[in-house]
Image (spheres, rainbow, N blue to C red):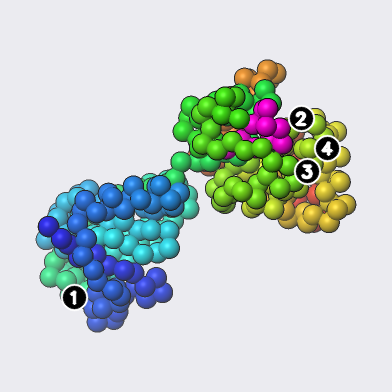
Amino acid sequence: MLLRYRFWEPKSFCSETNSLTCLGVLSIMSSMDIYEEIVRLRRLGAKAALATIVRRVGSTPRKDHAKMLVRQDGTSVGTVGGGCAEAEVWQAAKGVMDSGRPKVLKFELTEDDAEKDGLVCGGTVEVFVEPILPDPQVVILGAGHLGQAIAEASHRVGFKVIVLDDRESFANKDRFPQAEQVAAAPFETALDSVKVNPDSFVLVVTRGHKYDQLALENALKTGARYIGLVGSRRKIQIIVQNLLNKGIPAEAFRNLYAPIGLEIGSETPEEIAISVVAEFLAIIKGLHKRSHKQRFAMELLKEVRAPVEN
């Protein structure tokens, strides 16, 4: 059975006479196609949000469990009834994609509302809007013992792992069987072959100050959500100051986390890996605040700009 879906024009939701006239192109697609589209989007690493009617009372436009999938570009598949209520669901879906948190919407459709939207219905509708997100990605610059431990811990909680190092004897599948991609390349150009997006986590855990600085300079250009640098306060201060002196703008350090990980007294590579992955999860869930040690790195930027937000 084929059903109609709507392609939204985001700037025009509701007509004064009939909101269905502002829905753009109509096409045909089944409920099964919605799930197939979800699979396709996840394979592409794209975001989306799925809206489902979970409760209705009275005469409403759609039956229970009707669904609408909203893509990151604003286009949508399926419908939860049309009208301005559906426009609000579309807006909520965009917010859910950004926050990563689900949301429940409740609509009271009076007869006047229904008539205004060109619908022959009324009643109460509850819509559950949930995010459809790609697996989180961590890019590890440095294939030593710490890189190995972080790769393993990240993989266990569902991260897509990419490992980069300038030594083929370290950057290989034998050492990182769980990694989706392992490559040997100079640290200053290693990220050129990796698709880093605004939701990616990038870690700099190379074998020394020189390589950390090369890798961090490259990482700061990616706009990744998290750019972590391992090391002591002195090391972080030297590298940050060197990059500032090279002309790297202070704004580029906004997503720098140095040193990496939550403060749990970790010492071994395995313990540090647990603290790092826990920090990733706290950031994803919106629960993270920079530690006192991490705020030190942000203080270094005050001389050239206002303080960077947490």
Tell me which residue sits at (59%, 36%) in the image: 182
Q: CA distance from mark 4 to mark 1?
A: 67 Å
Q: Is residue 191 left or right of residue 133?
A: right
Tell me which residue sits at (53%, 32%) in the image: 179
Q: Is residue 74 magenta?
A: no
The answer to whether marks 4 and 3 mark residues whose Cβ atoms lie closer than 8 Å is yes
Q: Is residue 94 left or right of residue 289?
A: left
x and y percentages locating residue 52 in the rendered image: 26, 51
Q: CA distance from mark 2 to mark 3?
A: 12 Å
Q: Secondary structure at mark 2?
A: loop
**Residue 118 in view:** yes
Residue ID for mark 2: 207
**Residue 214: numbered disc:** 3
**Main SS class of the magenta portion in the image:** loop
How crowded pointer 1 is (Cα within 10 Å; few <14, some 14-19, many 20+) is rated as some
The foreground one among 97 and 214 is: 214
Going by the numbered disc 2, the residue's amino acid type is: Arg
Going by the numbered disc 4, the residue's amino acid type is: Lys
Residue ID for mark 4: 210
Q: CA distance from mark 2 to mark 1?
A: 66 Å
x and y percentages locating residue 235 in the rendered image: 83, 34
Q: Quadrant of the C terminus?
A: top right
The foreground one among 308 and 31 is: 31
Q: CA distance from mark 1 to mark 3?
A: 61 Å
The foreground one among 232 and 203 is: 203
Q: Quadrant of the N terminus?
A: bottom left
